[in-house]
Amino acid sequence: MHSGKTAPRSVLGRVKVSYPRLLRILVPLDFSGKSRQALRYAVPLAQKFSARIHLVHVLPTPSKSELAELPRLRQQALRRLGEMALQLLPPRLRDENAVLAGNPAESILALAEKNNIDLIVLTTKGRTGLKRVLVGSTAEHIMRHAPCPVMSVRRR
């Protein structure tokens, strides 16, 4: 006799029931408190899947007059990322931190590709309509072109 409950197998059809492989999670940070919100999602995921979290910060493309300052700015940002990792990430989740310079979206995508990142977790400002079109969206570009899944956390 049919109990009225549908077996999970029939609901899922041919979808494979297994967890995705998450070994490396990339979290871009701009040092605002808001960008840290991505870590609220990245940390539990990393714990669940025994993954490691890579933190990245992208400096703006330096002008010719700013080129001499780039090594100092990079070192400063790397130190801040290290401090954030110590403060916000359990030791077994920490992995390499990176500071890049250039177009944020392209830099993050290149790093994700190079390091075989399995998931990017980032915050978005939540702009919509004309404002988004005029301003452009780093997060949107990353979501469209990433070599892996992207989790977007809206800033609050």
Image (cartoon, rainbow, N blue to C red):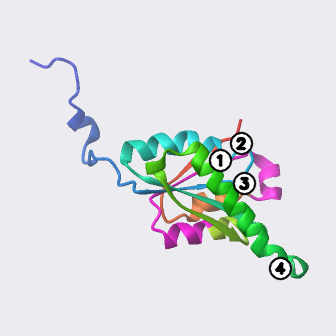
Under circle 1, the secondary element is: strand
Q: Residues within 10 Å of mark 1 (few under 14, many from 20)?
A: many
Viewer-side label of 4, 2 = 4
Tell me what residue is drawn at x 72 percent, y 61 percent. Answer: 77
Tell me the amino acid under the disc marked 3.
Asp
First in sequence: mark 3 or mark 4? 3
First in sequence: mark 3 or mark 1? 3
| Left or right relative to 111: residue 100 | right
First in sequence: mark 1 or mark 2? 2
| Image coordinates for residue 8, horizontal then vertical, percent | 24, 33
Bounds of the magenta segment: 108-136
Q: Are marks 1 and 2 in contact (CB under 8 Å)?
A: yes
Quickly name the residue at label 2: 34
Name, please, the residue furthest toward the left.
1
The N terminus, quarter of image: top left
CA distance for labels 3 and 2 = 9 Å
Under circle 4, the secondary element is: helix
Quickly name the residue at label 3: 30
Q: Decide if residue 40 is in sight here.
A: yes
CA distance for labels 4 and 1 = 29 Å
- Of residues 72 and 8, the one drawn nearer to the viewer in this rendering: 72
Under circle 3, the secondary element is: loop
Q: Which mark is residue 123?
A: 1
CA distance for labels 3 and 1 = 10 Å
